[in-house]
Image (cartoon, rainbow, N blue to C red):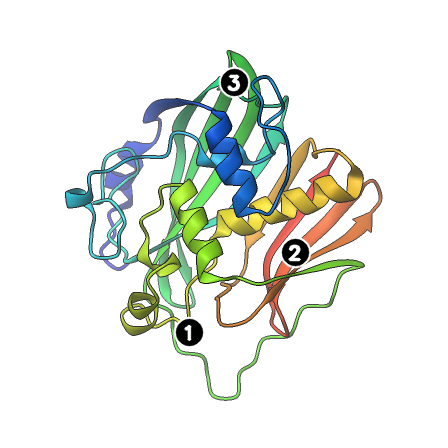
Amino acid sequence: MSGLDLEDLRHWIGQSESRSELVTGAMVDRFRSTFDQEGDVAEGNVAPVMIHLCVAPPAAPTGGLGPDGHPARGGFLPPVPLPRRMWAGGAFTFHDDIRVGERVARTSTIRDVTLKEGRTGSLCFVTVDHRIESAGRLVIEERQDIVYRGADAPRAPGERPEPAAPGTHRVVVVPSAALLFRYSALTFNGHRIHYDAPYATGVEGYPGLVVHGPLQATMLVQLAERLHGRRPARFDFRSLSPLFDDADFTLNADEDGGDLRLWTAGVGGPVAMEARASW
């Protein structure tokens, strides 16, 4: 498949790394400000759900970044020789809350590396398990699915994806450049497609800045928490198509027994991310 050496890439299976960071009131304040939330950031208070994605991100030197803003291939993640990388999906199991003032430690382990053929050619999927502890307590178990792929194939003339149906609960989000930049800063994500419009459109060929998958997942978990009055115990999600800052998008939810079925979609566009929250 396109010269990809699966056996070599699978040598990364089992590789682990650990990182930790103190969750300060200042970090929580920046997170809440990004999502227009209010709340007391005093030490000992519960930190907002999904803040763990902003804790102890990889910090590659600026000189070690590639032209797209991603760190050079290799290191913890396998050096997959495909040009585009995205967060394809995953799952969170929430066991307990993170509290302000606690040290959060994340241990990450490569679970699997697989290859598939897609519409644009070879796809390489890397599955990473994360174990997140706060002050020594297990708070979150996460499965992260990363996909590496080639450039997008051009859409056939007249081909239009089916627009997503609106949910019983629906919230319109304006994907401003400031919002995307702030989330990139929170997660120390240097990928230029999220904040550098000339690069995203002129080099990568996108119609605008790309809305982060983790940002969409965070907003859907926050919506689930608001609708049920508490954070879910389990959240599973899958990315289906990209969202851009050239149009507003929506957060949607329908009740499904005791669960919530959730999705994001550009206004008039197809489902971008689908998810399920359970309690």
Residue picked out by circle 1: 207
Distance from label 1 to label 3 (Cα)? 40 Å
Identify the amino acid type marked 3: Ser
Distance from label 2 to label 3 (Cα)? 29 Å
> Whole-percent x and y of residue 141?
55, 27
> Whole-percent x and y of residue 138?
56, 17
Give the label on residue 263, or none. 2
The image quadrant where one finds the N terminus is: bottom left
Viewer-closest of 227 and 37: 37
Give the mark nearer the N terminus: 2 vs 3. 3
Secondary structure found at label 2: strand
Check contact, mark 1 vs mark 3: CB within 8 A: no
Classify residue 71 by image quadrant: top left
Viewer-closest of 184 and 107: 184
- For the view shown, which residue lies furthest in the bottom direction? 158
The residue located at (64%, 75%) in the rendering is 268
Residue picked out by circle 3: 134
Viewer-closest of 42 and 121: 42
In the picture, measured across the screen, residue 157 lies left or right of residue 226, that is: left
In the picture, measured across the screen, residue 176 lies left or right of residue 73, that is: right
